[in-house]
Structures are given as C-alpha cells and as structure tokens.
Amino acid sequence: MININEHGRREIPVPSFTHGDLEDLAHAALGLESSRVAGAINIHDQPARALSKAYEKRKVKAGGKPIRDLHLTGHMLAARAITDTGDKSVTIGFNDGLQYAKAAQNEKHENMLGPSPADKHQLDEHAHEILQANIRILNGQ
C-alpha cells in the first residue's frame, strides 16, 4: 500500500510564450513570407503563375523581374508588419491602406501572402525552440 500525503500547495510553473516571443515569431513569419514571395512561390509552395504579357512587359521596363514576386517597388511587402498586439497575440497586417488594397487585388490573381505549409513547418520548429528555451529558464538552466 502506498500513502500519499499532501503537505501544502506547490506552484508548478507552466512554460509559455512571452510577448517578445510572439513578436519574434511574427517577424520570423514575415521573413519567411518575404523570402518565399521573392522566389515567386505562392502560398501553396508552388511556383506562382506567370504574369500577363502586358504586365510582364511593364514590370521589366520599370526594372523588375518578369515573375510574380510582388517586388516592383517593394512598397507592398514593406507595408507588411505587426499591426496589433495583445497580451497573448500578435497580428500581422498592412500599415498602409493603399498597399493593402493593392495586395487584395493581387491576391485575386494568386494567393501569395500568409504562411505556406513550408513556412508553417519552419515556424513550428522555431516555436518549439523558443518553448524549449523557456522550459530551461524555468528549470534554472
């Protein structure tokens, strides 16, 4: 027979993400998105569709690459940022209404913005690393 006696309450710290951790993950998500889009890879980790001939010609004339990479001026992707924060959340959006409107039109042609399956996998690995570090901190390591 085993007897277990409780001699008071013990607080067991539960590891979680700090607000800084959430911002770190959001910035990592933006970096992954930007890198993927620069390679003309859509949200499904597939090569993006070709540009229309007219737009391709206009884009090349303006100094851009003849691919769907959302980098003609760079303003749209530069407007992607953390737009809201809470105690347990961070929101990524646009900090410029014009760039948001342009992105909404672009998304009608091809979904490029947001995390792809490969992006999500890398973010999961990064989140796991952060959580493991927070566990080590709680354990005094």
Image: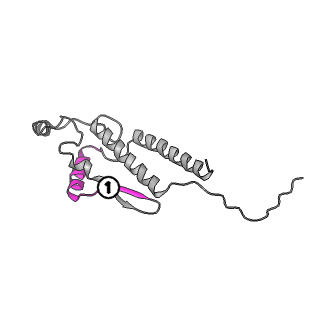
Considering every residue shown, the one lying at the far front of the view is 141
Q: Mark 1: give few (<14), some (14-19) or many (20+) Cα within 10 Å.
A: some
Q: Amino acid at mark 1?
A: Gly
Give the x, y percent position of residue 22: 44, 54
Question: Helix, strand, or loop for circle 1?
Answer: strand
Is 2 situated left or right of 57 in this image? right
| Residue lying at the far right of the rendered structure | 1
Q: Does residue 37 appear to the left or right of 6 in the view shown?
A: left
Say if the magenta span includes residue 104.
yes
Quadrant position of residue 83: bottom left
Counting labels gives 1
Question: Could you tell me residue 118's position as x and y percent?
Answer: 41, 38
- Magenta residue span: 89-111
Name the residue nearer the viewer: 132 or 48: 132
Task: Report which residue position mark 1 lands on.
Answer: 93
Q: Tell me where residue 124 appears, x and y as whole percent.
A: 48, 44
Q: Residue at x 59, y 49 (%)?
A: 135
The residue depicted at 34 percent of the width and 42 percent of the height is 43
Q: Residue at x 27, y 38 (%)?
A: 38
Question: Nearest the camera: 17 or 45?
Answer: 17
Q: Residue at x 49, y 46 (%)?
A: 127
Tell me residue 130's x, y (percent).
51, 47
